Amino acid sequence: MESLLWPVMLLLAGIGLVCLEVFVPSAGLLGVLAAIAVITSIVLAFSHSLVVGTLFLLVTTIVVPLVVALAIKSWRHTPIGKLILIQRPASAREVLPDTEEYHRRDRMVGKRGVAKTELLPSGDVLVDGQVYDAVSNGVVIAAGQAIRVVDVNTQRLVVRPLSEAELAAEQAAPDNVLSTPIDSLGIEPFDDPLA
């Protein structure tokens, strides 16, 4: 039994060095030492007997890849793994550009405009006096048709056509009450105290 002590110790040391190689950057030195330890363990086991050598070879072919796979799987949770690997963002908004141009486009969601060209599904739209590249949300939009911006997808506006009911409702309610003439509101003019 004492003659099996060295092969077992070398096999355990080799498996430990393989696991350590994954976590410690050693330029392959620990991997070479692990390979030497495992091969020496198998050779010493075969020198004891053919059955023991075959058993060590079988254990090595099963355990070493399993240990490497588990070490690599848990490596991304280590501090070094978190620094090296790219973490998946929680939402798509985290990877979008943080530029004034993007924020200006993002504020356009909900605004109304007109299709400058036919959107089949992409084309140009006129919103707030500026022409933008846009894509429809799956519907063909004719040139000159009223649209509403529903989303911003990278550098493109996502638009949908306005229905007749929406257009009628918007025309019935003015956008800005302050821009309507005072006569149309039915408010009496103030009395002039100096008159």
Image: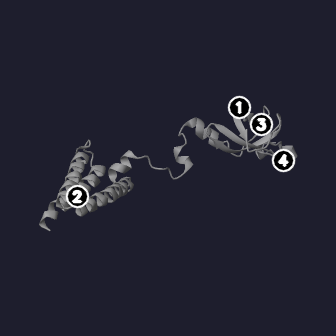
Give the alpha-carbon distance from disc 4 to disc 3, as whole Å. Answer: 18 Å
Residue labelled with disc 2: 11
Residue labelled with disc 1: 130
Residue labelled with disc 4: 163
Secondary structure, mark 4, is loop
Mark 3 / mark 2, whichever is N-terminal: 2
Q: Nearer the viewer, mark 3 or mark 1?
A: 3
Amino acid marked by disc 2? Leu
Q: Position of residue 95 (x, y in %)?
A: 52, 44
Q: Dot 3, how many residues are within 10 Å of its Cα: few (below 14), some (14-19), or many (20+)?
A: few
Give the alpha-carbon distance from disc 3 to disc 1, as whole Å. Answer: 20 Å
Q: Name, please, the residue furthest toward the left.
A: 2
Marking on residue 120:
3
Give the alpha-carbon distance from disc 2 to disc 1, as whole Å. Answer: 72 Å
Amino acid marked by disc 1? Gln
Instruction: State left or right for residue 105 relative to residue 12.
Output: right
Instruction: Give the quarter of the figure containing the N terminus.
Output: bottom left
Marking on residue 168:
none
Q: Residue at x 40, y 47 (%)?
A: 85
